[in-house]
Amino acid sequence: MKALFFFCAFLLMLAPFLEARQIRVLSENIEFTGKIGSSQRKSIILQNESNQAKEYVLKFLRGNIGSTQNIKLCIGDECFDPRKDLAKIKLTLQPGEIFTDMYLEFFLGITETRGNFDLHFTNTANLRDVFIIEAVYNTVNPNANGNDTFHRDISIGEVYPNPSNRVAYIDYEFKNPAALAKISINSFIGNPIGEFRLDPMQKTLVINVSELNPGVYFYTLFVDNKNIVTKKLVVKK
């Protein structure tokens, strides 16, 4: 009888902890990598794995964000500065809901640097029920090396991050919007992997490499069907 009493008491003590961590952050490994002075936006996808509606508030922001960097957390059409607007940043998730109307916008600053930050959310009805959004950033100086390619119709930078395991980026800028430019990707032995038309209205090409096998690939810039330059892309697990 006494053993049963202690077992029931243990379950009562454990219950609040079993309720915790019922929000899953589906958009893991949020990474901002880009040139000095650029801004990037990343979507945040959350899932309420419980059978109850839950309200969360941003409890605190932890990390090293520089004085020249800016951060915005947007929920729907409302955007907030998480360094100043903690009490204003609230969201309610319905039972089983996958919430997609949330994103982070990050200005990478004016100096070459790297770092990370975390956003800690707490359930307003249960302080033990928390979830954390983790992000890293890497601000690069495009003038730190001579690897950028300058053509009369387009300027294009190096692929980054390199090696990459999820998404790779190539920054570019058209000088002649009428030019036809594309990036072609081939395997180490020359097999075609993919081809991407560069849009004069955009500044960055985003390449999903998560489904590629680890190894060495080559990407080639073509302008008006002429081979301009070929460089290496490394994909890792």
Image (tube, rainbow, N blue to C red):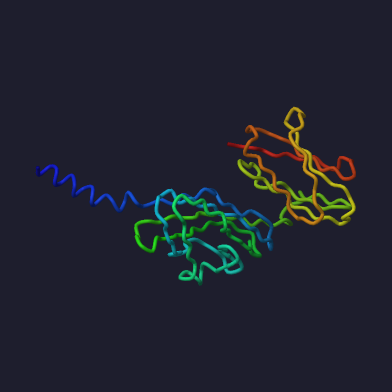
Where residue 218 appears, as percent x and y from the top left, is: 74, 36
Where residue 67 appears, as percent x and y from the top left, is: 58, 69
- Residue situated in front as seen by the camera: 7 or 189: 7
Q: Which residue extends farthest left?
A: 1
Q: Which residue extends farthest top?
A: 189
What is the number of callouts on the image? 0
Residue visible at 58% across and 65% down?
72
Answer above or below: position of 226 versus 134.
above
- Residue situated in front as seen by the camera: 191 or 115: 191
Give left or right: position of 132 versus 184.
left
Give left or right: position of 221 versus 37.
right
Residue visible at 50% across and 54% down?
134
Give left or right: position of 200 versus 112.
right
Residue visible at 77% across and 43% down?
196
- Residue situated in front as seen by the camera: 109 or 191: 191
Q: Quadrant of the N terminus?
A: top left
Q: Quadrant of the C terminus?
A: top right
Answer above or below: position of 163 versus 177.
above
Where residue 222 appears, as percent x and y from the top left, is: 85, 42
Q: Quadrant of residue 194?
A: top right
Where residue 226 appears, as percent x and y from the top left, is: 89, 41
Q: Quadrant of residue 213?
A: top right
Answer above or below: position of 85 versus 189.
below
Residue visible at 54% across and 52% down?
45
